[in-house]
Image: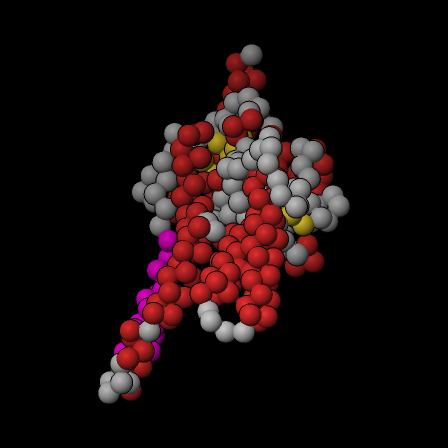
Amino acid sequence: MELLHEEKLNLLAEKVEQLMEWSSRRSVIRMNGDKFRRFVKAPPRNYSVVVMFTALQPQRQCSVCRQANEEYQVLANSWRYSSAFSNKLFFTIVDYDEGADVFQQLNMNSAPTFMHFPPKGKPKRADTFDLQRIGFAAEQLAKWIADRTDVHIRVFRPPNYSGTIALALLVSLVGGLLYLRRNNLEFIYNKTGWAMAALCVVFAMTSGQMWNHIRGPPYAHKNPQNGQVSYIHGSSQAQFVAESHIILLLNAAITMGMVLLNEAATSKGDVGKRRIICVVGLGLVVFFFSFLLSIFRSKYHGYPYSFLIK
């Protein structure tokens, strides 16, 4: 019995030493089927392993996988180069083209997927990250890992000056325009221009652009079994980036219809022309509002009302 215990300790020490060596080379350890079964599935273990199951090869055309991988690398680097780094947590990745047998073993049919394998026992339901609802931002992954392992990772992102440069260019452009038009600044008081700018901001906010910025959801979802692409998320607790673009366009179309109806009612032009404008405006409002309502019904299951489009 004592000899068996010593063998387990030696095997555990060998596995931890090997994982630490790999971690010293790169923050995320790439694994195939054999490595996954030996270092992640097989006992003994006294460490947690976070695995990203993905499909990064270009022929897989998984843009979401590449975006999620970038966030995953940021998180793994933050852990690897932090002062709290230890051998209690390792970040790994299994690509479908390198470990298809692992996907089959776990009955996994979608990517990317994040799973936590605890030191003892099998993963529970909460050990699978809810990417569709939460998104794959490094900060959200870090929070999930803290809940599962009590390991708190402070995310450090590499400096990104693109936003600063873009802001500087915008300020320069606006400043140059004002300087060139310094003798004629009447355009600043143009109500139509300010109204269009305000509408753009309203459309962006009401379509969920801020939610996308915070949560970092995928653009759309492609079913790996039948290849069908979903642009509308089926839950009221999440959305895709494409969905927010669709909602933005629908709101813009409805607003355009309302503007045309107002124009038909207040203008003093030809009656026939006003009638045409009224019909077009009414058609825009009715059709696109029906479309918007149908999307609402698809997300809030049980909502009883619809109009034209179910």
Q: Residue at x 60, y 33 (%)?
A: 304
Residue extending farthest to the right is: 226
Q: Nearer the viewer, residue 58 or 187?
A: 187
Q: Is residue 291 visible?
A: yes
The kind of secondary structure the magenta stretch mainly shows is helix
Image spot of residue 34 (x, y percent)? 66, 38
- Looking at the rendering, in which quadrant would you find the C terminus? top right
* Residue at 66 percent of width and 56 percent of height: 61
What residue appears at the point 37 percent right and 46 percent down from the top-left corner?
155
Q: Nearer the viewer, residue 135 or 84?
A: 135
Which quadrant holds residue 7?
top right
Q: Position of residue 307 (x, y in %)?
A: 62, 43
Considering every residue shown, the one lying at the far top of the view is 1
Query: What is the x, y in percent for residue 23?
Result: 47, 45
Q: Quadrant of residue 295?
A: top right
Q: In the figure, 91 relative to 220: above or below?
A: above
Give the magenta-colored segment's residue range.
Answer: 157-175
Q: Quadrant of the N terminus?
A: top right
Answer left or right for 33 relative to 120: right
Residue at x 56% of width, y 50% of height: 289
